[in-house]
Structure formats: C-alpha cells, structure tokens
Image (spheres, rainbow, N blue to C red):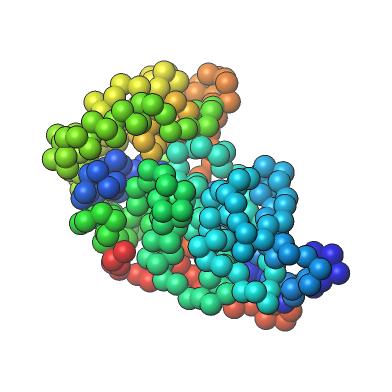
Amino acid sequence: MGARRPIKTVNSICPIRINDLGGWTDTWFAEYGEVLNIGVYPYVQCQMHVLPLDPDSENRVTIHAVDYGDRYGINPDKLIYDKHPLLEAAIDLMGVPRDLAVEVSISSPVPGGCSTGTSAAVSVALIGALDRATYGRLTPAEVAMKAHAIETQKLRQQCGIQDQLSAAYGGILHIRMFKYPHAQVSYLDVSNELRWELESRLALIFLGETHKSSEVHQWVIRQLEGSGPEHPTLCKLRGLAQAGKNAIYEGDLNELGRLMIENTEAQAELHPDLVSPVARQTIEIARRHGAIGWKINGAGGNGGSITLLLPSDWARRKDLIRAIEEIGGGVREIPIYLSRIGLRVWETRPGATRQTAGRPPGDATA
C-alpha cells in the first residue's frame, strides 16, 4: 500500500459446495432442474483495501492472487482479461469509483479445479467486497446472479447456477430452477445433532489433479442439448435431488448414501469417463472400508474431487482415509465443516466494525 493509508478495509468470505445431487440439471440445456448441495468450509476469502486515488498511476486496481503468487496492477477503464480473467471480469462488471483505488487479495486453501464451485465462490466473495466498497447493498440472490453473469456473459463459459447460489447462501440448499436461470432457493433447517453427524461423516477427497472442462463434457452437452430437457438421465437426476432433500429432513443417512451412489452412476450413464479411473479406485477403497455413499462432485471427468459418506465407526473412518491417501499422486482429504450461512461481508475501520452476514432464513427466489 506504500504511503497511502486505506480509507477502509472490506473483508468477505464464502463457502464452497459439495455433494451436488442433481447436478447437470441447473444448466441452460436442461431448462429446468433441481439440485441439493451442501455448503462447506474451507472458504474463499477476499480482503480489499480502499485507498485514496494516486494521481501518478493509472492502475487504480491492484490484484493479489495469493495462491498463485501473482500481484499486478490494472486500469479498470482499459481491462483485458489475460492474467486472472475471473477476477478481472468481476472488477469490470462491478466497477471502481474513479476517485478511489483498491487493492484486492483473494485466497483459498482449496486446490483450483477441485469441482467444488471454487471459481463461483471467488466471484461471489469479490462481488460482495466490491459491492460493500462501492455502492452496495446487493442481496444474496443478486450477488449470485452477477457472479453467474461473469462466467456466462463476460467469459462466455458453460455454467450452471448452483455454485453461485451455494456460495451466496451457504448451508444445506435445495435449488429448484423453474426456468433457467431463475430458481427458488430453500434452506434446509435441520437439528444440530443431524448437522454434527453429517459433518463428522462427510469427507471431501481431492483426486490429485485440477479438473478442466474437456471434450467429454462438450460431447455430453451436445447430446443433452439435442435430446431436450426430458432426457431420461436428466429426469433421474432431478428426482435424486428431491429424494436427497427428503432423506436429510428424515435424518436417514443410509438413504442419502444410496442416493449419492445412484447419482454417481447416473453421471456415468451420461458418459463413462465422467467417473475417472482414480475416482473408481477411490470408490472401491471407500466401499471396502465401509463407506455408505460416494458422489463425484460437479460435472465429473478427470481430476476434481469426490464426496464420501463415511461409516459411523470413527476408527474405520481413519483407516479409510489412510488407505485412500496411499493411492498417491496428490490424492488427499481436504478437511471440511458445514457452513451455516453463505457470503459474509464486513468492514474494518479504525475503532469501528460493521458487519452484514449471509442469507435471511427461509426461501428466496433468484
């Protein structure tokens, strides 16, 4: 920051998501859909120092992508999406007042390409901070819609709607998309005991390499686009999200585990390569050690991650994780705990702190 002292500092954090039952149905080619997912930490975190304008520099924005070791300045009036397009597009969409400068730091302990909605969480955290630092206040639904617009309109990428909503709202969510991209978001309010049990038995396994969109995904999209919204697998996936919501409300983890397995098998029906060899090896080890559920996170394919529903015996869980990590090649557990809320934004000022937190209870429409 040099000699300039910040006018204020804005902080924001939001969760990633796992176990997205019904994924693939929150897309434009599905037209309508249902997804059940679970917001978890570790979170994406953003800190933004709002500074007086430096008249000697045209770069009014400094970006520090902490996990990549990148720090560079940009002129928000002459943006080229070249180094970190997601961050640059968010700044382009939200804007920075001409009489101010900002320094933005973004980081997350989750590996890039983990298939847990991390990119969407980055957008949500940055939009939340920019909103608070500029003209705020956006609702969680509005933040999610802007984050979705960054990927689909600014960057012209294929993108469903669930990741942005999960990052903005947090918690255990049932998303009913009645017409792409518009959806109703319902927060599942469960007992503390069920939350603690879920938290102790869900495990996130990183499969050792970054997930990237591939020819397999493009092939699946073409097939689904050609078949229309009533494709049998899309219908099955919608039903699994609804059934998963019921299983969680009933506290039936055995049924939830069965649905996770059925969802993974449905993904393989779309294309067998959506469940990679490393994922199949991980699943087989988990099965032998008593896991009752497994779900390939996100769209599937090479790399990414898998959610496991572990046995109730704690000693067996440790043996299971140890056996999986012996696969090598970077396969490892990422410790998680369940989020109760989504995007949190607060200011740090000398002698004062003001905070706005998360989603109001109940349902919302995006």
Residue in the foreground of this view, choosing between 19 and 58? 58
Q: In the image, residue 346 lies at what x, y percent?
A: 58, 71
Relative depth, front residue between 105 and 78: 78
Query: Visible in this render: residue 246?
Result: no
Which quarter of the figure has residue 115?
Answer: top left
Viewer can see residue 3: yes
Of 76 and 66, nearer the camera is 76
Residue at horizontal 49 percent and vertical 58 percent from the top:
124
Q: Is residue 317 left or right of residue 272?
A: right
Please identify the residue farthest to the bottom as the structure is shown: 351
Q: Residue furthest right?
A: 3
Rendered view: 121 above or below 240: below
The residue that appears at 78% across and 65% down in the rendered structure is 57
Q: Could you tell me residue 2's position as x and y percent?
A: 84, 65
Relative to 125, say whether 97 is above or below. Answer: below
Q: Quadrant of the N terminus?
A: bottom right
Which quadrant is home to the C terminus?
bottom left
Number of marks drawn: 0
Q: Residue at x 45, y 42 (%)?
A: 116
| 188 left or right of 349 in image | left
The answer to which image quadrant residue 158 occupies is top left
Residue located 63% across and 54% down the image: 106
134 to the left or right of 201:
right
